[in-house]
Image: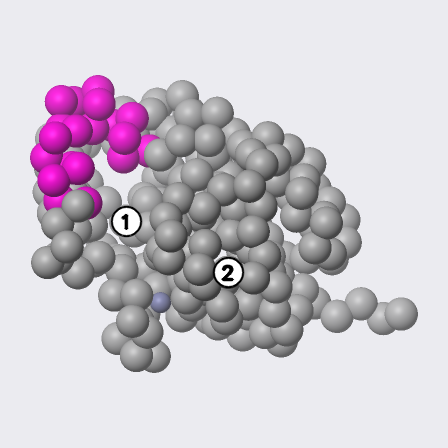
Amino acid sequence: MASRPKLVVFDMDGTLINGRLIEVVSNKYGLTEKVVGIQSDQSLQGYKKTEMIASLLKGIKPIEIVRAIDSIPIMNNADKIVTWFKRNGYVTGIITDSYTIAAEVIANKLKIDFFAANELDVEDGVLTGGIKMPLGWEKINCSCTISICKRYHLNHYSNRYGVSIEDTIAIGDTRGDICMIKQAGLGIAFMPKDQDIIKQSKNIIFNPDLNEILNYM
Ligand SMILES: [Zn+2]
């Protein structure tokens, strides 16, 4: 059988890594209360929260973000499942509402082909508090309104790699992943963190083991 191009995209925090970068960083810099306050404010759109959290990081050196992401363990069998996908003809990617400097570390560790994330502004060797967000929901009318619409980017990368949408797989753990999980040929909620993603996902993995994705292949 001639193989058609295929694509698998992963969320990062809570999916490819067993932890959340912003929790580690905010703990280290005494920002936890402020970050949690922003995250739990129901009146704010998702992308606004991302902007406000980035502004709290002003003055931190980018290397500290790299150290923080390095301190978070990789999810069980992440390397194994990425290798399996690559061997079976999949392009692999990370789509995360975290930061490019962190996603790059994880992409390099796991030999993942590409990543899409928010870019923290750096000047004179420190974070300025500014951030460039890919967005995308405003172009396709997606209700997610987060800093990086995962559905928009799933479509974008499937076009770029010539993959039809039924040959895509998306895996994530939170509300922000729902739009891509529903769009992908195969969408999987992995260790779901909120009721919305549980309600809206047909395929759910409740064990912290990425190898269980193979049960759906
Ligand atoms: Zn979206």
Residue 214, position as x, y percentages in the image: 72, 48
Residue located beneath label 1 in the image: 119
Amino acid at dot 2: Ser
Above-or-below relation of 20 to 85: above
Residue segment shown in magenta: 21-39
* Mark 1 Cα shell of 10 Å, populated few (<14), some (14-19), many (≥20): some
Quick one: 201 or 113, which is closer to the camera?
201
Residue 10 is left or right of residue 66, and the answer is right
Residue 58, image quadrant:
top left
Residue 129, position as x, y percentages in the image: 12, 42
Q: At 69% across and 36% down in the image, what residue appears? A: 80
Q: From mark 2 to mark 1, how far is it between C-alphas?
A: 29 Å
Q: At 58% across and 36% down in the image, what residue appears? A: 207
Residue 13, position as x, y percentages in the image: 41, 40
Quick one: 153 or 176, which is closer to the camera?
176
* Mark 2 Cα shell of 10 Å, populated few (<14), some (14-19), many (≥20): some
In front: mark 2 or mark 1? 2
Looking at the rendered structure, the number of numbered marks drawn on it comes to 2
Residue located beneath label 2 in the image: 201
Above-or-below relation of 31 to 166: above
